[in-house]
Each structure stands twice: as C-alpha cells, then as structure tokens.
Image (spheres, rainbow, N blue to C red):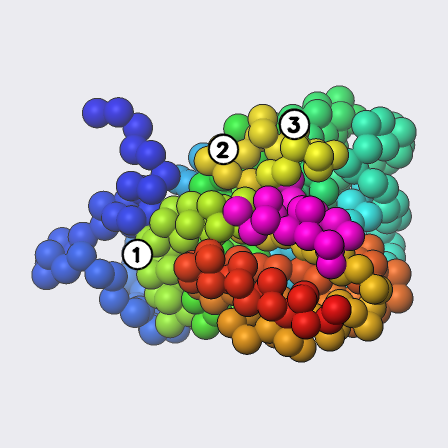
C-alpha cells in the first residue's frame, strides 16, 4: 500500500484502535507510577510518569510520522522544547541564531543562554551568505532558524542552511511552528531537529500549552535532550496530550483553510491606501517568495503582518476598532487574532511600531476582510 499522506495520518492518528474495546478514541492515561515485574524489571517500558508516559506516546508518534523524523519528544511548552536543545550544548559552544525569531526565545538566548556560557551570534539568515559568513570552524555547533519568521515572515532557505551547518560539523534546528508539517517538512530538506510550539497550529484551539521536538537521528545530542526533559520535568500532562492529539487530527483542514484566507487577505490589502506594506511570503513581491515556493507546499501559511500608514498611533487605533478579529497574543487557533507586536516585544523588536501581526483563523474570509477594512477606514 502506498505511503499515507499527511492529512490521512493526522485524521486517523496513524489508525490507532484500542485492542480490547475497539475504541477509536484513545483514553486519557493519568497514571504516574507503574508495577515492577517480579524479577525487578519494567518490561512495560514505563517506570514513572516524569521520564515517560503513555499519555503522550501517540501524539509523539503522529508528529514523527507527519515530519518524517526518527522520533519525537513532547514538552510542557514551546519554550521548554527550545530550551532543551540549547541546554544540550556545552558552555563555550558557538551558536548562530536568527535575528528575527520568536521574541521570548531571543530574549532567553540574550540573557540566560549567554549566562550558560553559549556564544550566541544573531544574523539575518534570510540574506544570502549571512549564515556562511558567521560560521566559526570547529566552534559552531548549532544553527537555529525560524521560517517563516515571526513577526515579519521572512524566509530562510532550509536546504542551504542545512548544507552550511553540516559542512561545519554543526546541527541545523528549525522552529517550524508557522509552517507546520502540512506545508514544510524540514527534515526532508536536511534539518536535524524540528521544533514546534504545539500550543499554536498543532493544537489549534487555544486551550493547550505544549511544545515538541522531532529529530532526524537519535544521536548524542538527542540523548542529552531526552535527559534534559527528564531532569527538568518539562513533560506534557496526560490531559493536555489528549487535547493536543485531538487538535492534530484536524490540522490539515485548518491549515489549508488558513492559508487560502491569508493569501486572499494579503492580496486585498497590498494596495490599500491605509497600508504601507503587507508582509506575506505568498505575495510575489516578498523577498522570500521564490524560496518559500520551493520549500512550502499547498500554501504560504496563515500568518501575515501589515504596516499601517500613520505609525504606531494609527496601528494601535486600528487594532482597537476591529470587531471580529480578537486583540490577543498567540497564533494558530481557529479564531483570528490581531496584535501590535512592538508593544509586546519591547526594545529591540524587529516589529516596527506600525506593524500589526495577523493570525488568520477559519472564519469566513470576507467577514475578516470587511472587519479590517472598516477598522482601517475609520482612521481617515
């Protein structure tokens, strides 16, 4: 039989069925401790709920299949997942990180990451030659990219970055939260580790905090990442894992709908008199459009940003006038969100003061356009 496509893998949760009851929906397994065999072994594979738990095994298996990876680890949040990668490095290791990236991780790298002893170098990875120019032979151990990158949605060439990393003896890790495995499978393009803030599209309903890492190989650094999850206790709770798996089963439908709507919204507002620029890789004038077209299939994502004419005051006022879009942080849920990112990220944010970030949900796209149209027009 042919290899199943992502939509089928996700919808059927790899065809899971309870062998005893024939149930198609997995149970919530809340156990924290397990019986030891009479000879003192744990043949079930489980000993205690912190290092491992059957509650998140199926969610990990589904995401592993979607990403085409070797194995997966679920974490209590996206930040916990990302930190586990960096904490697996050694003090003194050189890291190349993307300048435009999730602000919480960037701030952590600038503070605790450097206190940990890592040598962090931020570069614009979307610019040709920037990564190669930053490599320190024998010292660079990790290159961390995010594409499309929050909140400007710039694009980094994954295959090119992987080639540079591997020639330098380094690993390439990618935050693929915005793309999801429905649009991009970074491991196929050479990435070693794929990270997701599973709170976002994978869950898709704004009711779970979760993170995930998928690896191409169970190597030494992956072993240290596994140990970090165990030792730090950054595990996903069983009910959260159950909710995450439930959300992942509709991932393909939600991502496809969000992509279509985001493309239509971007095209509608690109020439709007109250909009300075629309930042969306699906537009031909986007600097990363060609690269995104090669490494994203079926759409360019459900995230875009607009720069509002009139600067910060006009942008904040526009967000205040929306009625359907929700003024809230996060992204990837079924509801559409709008946010003035500079207010959240503070000094050093790559988001200009005129930028509004839009997370497109699954509402009727014409209603979303009408609402944003009226919010912009009311500023005249």
Residue 161: x %, y % from top left: 72, 30
Q: Residue at x 82, y 72 (%)?
A: 313
Which image quarter holds the C terminus?
A: bottom right
Write down the residue under mark 1: 44
Q: Residue at x 84, y 27 (%)?
A: 129
Q: In the image, is residue 265 part of the stretch drawn in magenta?
A: yes
Nearer to us of marks 1 and 2 is: 2
Label pair 1/3, CB-CB below 8 angstroms: no
Label pair 1/2, CB-CB below 8 angstroms: no
Task: State how far apart marks 3 and 2 are (Cα).
Answer: 12 Å
Q: Which element carries disc 2, helix, strand or loop?
A: loop
Label pair 3/2, CB-CB below 8 angstroms: no
Residue sitting farthest toward the front: 380
Task: State how far apart marks 1 and 2 are (Cα).
Answer: 40 Å
Q: Quadrant of residue 160?
A: top right
Write down the residue under mark 2: 297
Q: Earlier in the sequence, mark 3 or mark 2?
A: 3
Q: In the image, is residue 90 part of the stretch drawn in magenta?
A: no
Crowdedness near tag 2: few (<14), some (14–19) or many (≥20) residues, C-alpha within 10 Å: some
Q: Earlier in the sequence, mark 1 or mark 3?
A: 1
Q: Which residues are magenta?
A: 264-281
Crowdedness near tag 3: few (<14), some (14–19) or many (≥20) residues, C-alpha within 10 Å: some
Q: Earlier in the sequence, mark 1 or mark 2?
A: 1
Q: Of residues 331 and 70, which is closer to you in this image?
A: 331
User: Can residue 368 be seen here?
Assistant: yes
- How many numbered circles does the render carry? 3
Q: Is residue 109 left or right of residue 253?
A: right
Residue 228: x %, y % from top left: 62, 58
Write down the residue under mark 3: 290
Residue 199: x %, y % from top left: 52, 63
Nearer to us of marks 3 and 2 is: 3
Q: Which element carries disc 1, helix, strand or loop?
A: loop
């Amino acid at each position: 039989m042919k290899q199943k496509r992502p939509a089928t893998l996700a919808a059927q949760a790899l065809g899971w069925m309870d062998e005893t009851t024939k149930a198609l929906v997995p149970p919530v397994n809340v156990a924290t401790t397990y019986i030891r065999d009479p000879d003192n072994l744990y043949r079930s594979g489980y000993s205690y709920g912190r290092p491992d738990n059957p509650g998140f095994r199926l969610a990990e298996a589904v995401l592993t299949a979607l990403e085409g990876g070797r194995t997966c680890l679920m974490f209590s949040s996206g930040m916990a997942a990302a930190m586990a990668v960096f904490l697996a490095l050694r003090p003194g290791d050189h890291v190349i990180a993307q300048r435009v990236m999730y602000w919480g991780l960037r701030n952590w790298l600038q503070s605790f990451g450097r206190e940990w002893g890592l040598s962090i170098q931020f570069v614009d990875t979307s610019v040709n030659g920037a990564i190669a120019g930053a490599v320190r032979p024998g010292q660079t151990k990790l290159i961390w990219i995010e594409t499309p990158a929050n909140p400007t949605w710039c694009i980094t060439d994954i295959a090119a970055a992987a080639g540079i990393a591997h020639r330098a003896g380094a690993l390439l890790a990618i935050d693929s939260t915005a793309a999801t495995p429905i649009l991009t499978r970074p491991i196929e393009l050479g990435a070693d580790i794929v990270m997701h803030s599973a709170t976002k599209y994978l869950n898709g309903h704004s009711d779970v905090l979760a993170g995930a890492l998928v690896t191409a190989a169970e190597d030494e650094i992956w072993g240290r990442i596994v140990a970090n999850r165990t030792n730090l206790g950054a595990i996903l709770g069983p009910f959260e894992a159950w909710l995450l798996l439930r959300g992942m089963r509709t991932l393909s439908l939600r991502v496809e709908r969000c992509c279509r709507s985001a493309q239509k919204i971007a095209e509608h507002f690109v020439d709007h008199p109250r909009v300075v620029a629309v930042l969306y890789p699906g537009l031909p004038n986007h600097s990363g459009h060609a690269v995104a077209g090669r490494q994203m299939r079926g759409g360019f994502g459900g995230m875009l940003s607009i720069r509002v004419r009139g600067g910060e005051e006009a942008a904040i006022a526009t967000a205040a006038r929306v009625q359907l879009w929700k003024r809230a942080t996060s992204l990837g849920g079924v509801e559409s969100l709008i946010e003035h990112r500079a207010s959240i990220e503070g000094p050093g944010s790559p988001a200009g003061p005129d930028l509004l970030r839009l997370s497109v949900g699954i509402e009727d796209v014409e209603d979303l356009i009408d609402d944003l149209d009226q919010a912009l027009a009311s500023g005249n």
